[in-house]
Image (cartoon, helix red, strand yellow):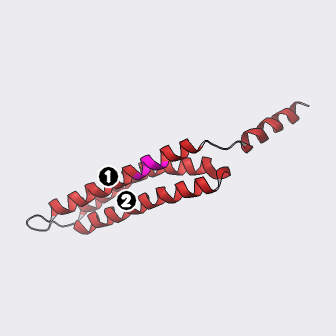
């Protein structure tokens, strides 16, 4: 009898969908963060090629492309989460992961630029 109650509670929890505002919040913040990083990379590219092009500017372009992909990914995650409410929890978690992924991408490109 006890295991039946646990199974019912787990089934009720699994069938519950997350609210749309949780998806909107995480996706909008991930999108804004990614766009700000694209702008920062663009600024770094302009400053790096101001007088004499600095070595490693190709990695800055790679950083811009990567952050652009993360921005597009946040929009796709929003659309997917709104289209499939049962997958909204996974979409929210994915959107929150985009923010540290952007930070990791910055650190990687910074390391690659320094090694050029």
Q: How many marks?
A: 2
Residue depicted at 57% across the width and 51% down the height: 91
CA gap, disc 2 to disc 1?
9 Å
Residue lying farthest to the right in this orientation = 1
What is the magenta segment's predominant secondary structure?
helix
Residue depicted at 62% across the width and 57% down the height: 83
* Position of residue 30 in the picture relative to residue 83 (left or right): left
What is the secondary structure assignment of the residue under circle 1? helix
Q: Position of residue 19 (x, y in %)?
A: 61, 42
> What's drawn in magenta, residue-wise?
27-31
* Position of residue 29 in the picture relative to residue 7 (left or right): left
Q: Which residue is mark 2?
A: 67
What is the secondary structure assignment of the residue under circle 2? helix
Q: Nearer the viewer, residue 116 or 86?
A: 86
Q: Is residue 29 visible?
A: yes
The N terminus sits in image quarter: top right
């Amino acid at each position: 009898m006890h295991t039946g109650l646990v199974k019912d509670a787990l089934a009720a929890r699994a069938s519950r969908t997350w609210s749309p505002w949780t998806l909107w919040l995480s996706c909008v913040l991930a999108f804004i963060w990614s766009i700000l990083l694209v702008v920062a990379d663009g600024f770094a590219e302009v400053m790096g090629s101001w007088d004499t092009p600095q070595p490693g500017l190709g990695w800055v372009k790679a950083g811009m492309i990567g952050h652009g992909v993360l921005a597009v990914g946040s929009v796709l995650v929003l659309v997917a989460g709104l289209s499939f409410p049962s997958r909204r929890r996974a979409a929210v978690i994915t959107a929150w992961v985009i923010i540290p992924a952007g930070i990791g991408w910055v650190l990687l490109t910074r390391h690659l630029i320094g090694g050029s």
